[in-house]
Amino acid sequence: MKEENKSRCIKCHYPNLEEIFTFCPNCGYPVNSNYCSDDNCEMNDPDDPVAFPETDCFCNYCGSETKYFKDGLIQPQKYD
């Protein structure tokens, strides 16, 4: 039997987020909401905003912090 691919909430780590969820049912944090923190950045186009992967700490377009990093939910990775 194939296991459904479910993700975890970035804030509270609720383990069973489904693709149809817009908000975490446990803490109410928006799902897939790692946007650029600069409201004037082109990545925040009101008609088609671009959410970054949950591990991205900075916008790759303007260099501003992402929402998850600004909210203290993630930290930059250290590479050798």
Image (cartoon, grey):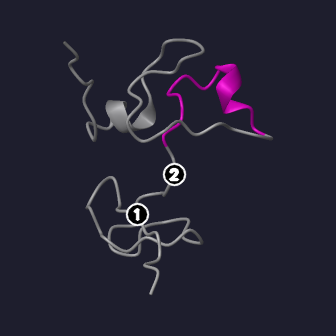
C-alpha separation, residue under disc 2 versus residue under disc 1 = 10 Å
Q: Residues within 10 Å of mark 1 (few under 14, many from 20)?
A: some
Please tell me how many numbered marks the rendered image carries: 2
Look at label 1 and name its amino acid.
Ser
Mark 2 lies on a secondary structure that is: loop
x and y percentages locating residue 39 in the rendered image? 60, 26
Name the main secondary structure of what is drawn in magenta.
loop
Residue corresponding to mark 2: 32
- Residue 24 x/y as whole percent: 42, 68
Q: Amino acid at mark 2?
A: Asn
Return the residue nearer the eye: 79 or 45: 79
- Give the image location of residue 40, x and y in percent: 65, 20
* For residue 60, above or below residue 55: above
- Examine the rendered structure and indicate whether residue 32 appears above or below residue 71: below
Q: Position of residue 62 (x, y in %)?
A: 57, 12
Task: Residue at 53% x, 28% y: name it.
Answer: 36
Report the span colored magenta: 34-46
Q: Which residue is mark 1?
A: 7
**Residue ID at (25%, 24%):** 77
Q: Is residue 12 magenta?
A: no
SS for callout 1: loop
Q: Is residue 41 above or below residue 14?
A: above
- Between tags 2 and 1, which lies in front? 1
The answer to whether residue 66 is left or right of residue 74 is right
- From the viewer's perspective, is residue 36 above or below residue 47? above
